[in-house]
Image (spheres, rainbow, N blue to C red):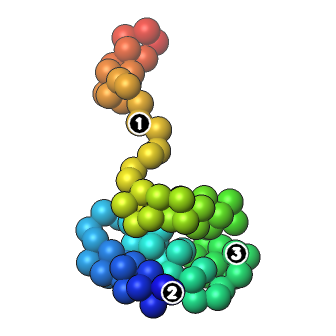
């Protein structure tokens, strides 16, 4: 089972062009290979909670869930906010 997981993660780790995906895959890859959460966080210079979140996401939803982008995206484009600020001040 572990070998199958590693084989699934490796192409995404090396070939995916989305800037966030390789790091997420590397987090899970290292955890599957026995690195502790603290070690992964230190090696990748990320928060330990990020390691936990990536690992949990992979455990619960598999590779497809890990690849999803679930970060907050503002509803208004930043340009309109800047224009409104300039007009106000």
Residue 48 visible (yes or no): yes
Viewer-proximal residue among 8 and 47: 8
The image quadrant that residue 50 belongs to is bottom right
Q: Which mark is residue 2?
A: 2
Mark-to-mark CA distance, 2 and 3: 18 Å
Mark 3 lies on residue: 37
Residue 42 visible (yes or no): no
In what element is the residue under mark 3? helix
The residue that appears at 50% across and 81% down in the rendered structure is: 29
First in sequence: mark 2 vs mark 3: 2
Which label lies toward us, 3 or 1? 3
Viewer-proximal residue among 6 and 43: 6
The residue that appears at 48% across and 77% down in the rendered structure is: 26
Q: Which mark is residue 35?
A: none
Mark-to-mark CA distance, 1 and 2: 34 Å
Within 10 Å of disc 3 (Cα), the crowding (few <14, some 14-19, many 20+) is: some
Above or below, 43 relative to 68: below
First in sequence: mark 3 vs mark 1: 3
In what element is the residue under mark 1? loop
Q: Position of residue 59 (x, y in %)?
A: 55, 65
Mark 1 lies on residue: 73
Within 10 Å of disc 2 (Cα), the crowding (few <14, some 14-19, many 20+) is: few
Viewer-proximal residue among 77 and 7: 7
Contact check, label 3 and label 1, Cβ < 8 Å: no
Which label lies toward us, 2 or 3? 2
Which label lies toward us, 1 or 2? 2
Q: Position of residue 28 (x, y in %)?
A: 53, 75
Within 10 Å of disc 1 (Cα), the crowding (few <14, some 14-19, many 20+) is: few
The image quadrant that residue 38 belongs to is bottom right
Mark-to-mark CA distance, 3 and 1: 28 Å
Q: Position of residue 51 (x, y in %)?
A: 62, 67
Above or below, 68 relative to 38: above
């Amino acid at each position: 089972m572990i070998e199958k997981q590693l084989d699934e993660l490796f192409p995404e780790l090396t070939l995916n062009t989305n800037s966030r995906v390789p790091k997420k895959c590397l987090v899970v890859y290292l955890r599957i290979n026995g690195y502790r959460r603290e070690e992964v966080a230190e090696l990748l210079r990320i928060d330990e909670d990020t390691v936990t979140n990536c690992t949990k996401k992979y455990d619960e939803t598999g590779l497809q869930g890990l690849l999803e982008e679930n970060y907050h995206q503002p509803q208004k484009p930043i340009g309109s906010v800047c224009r409104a600020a300039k007009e106000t001040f």
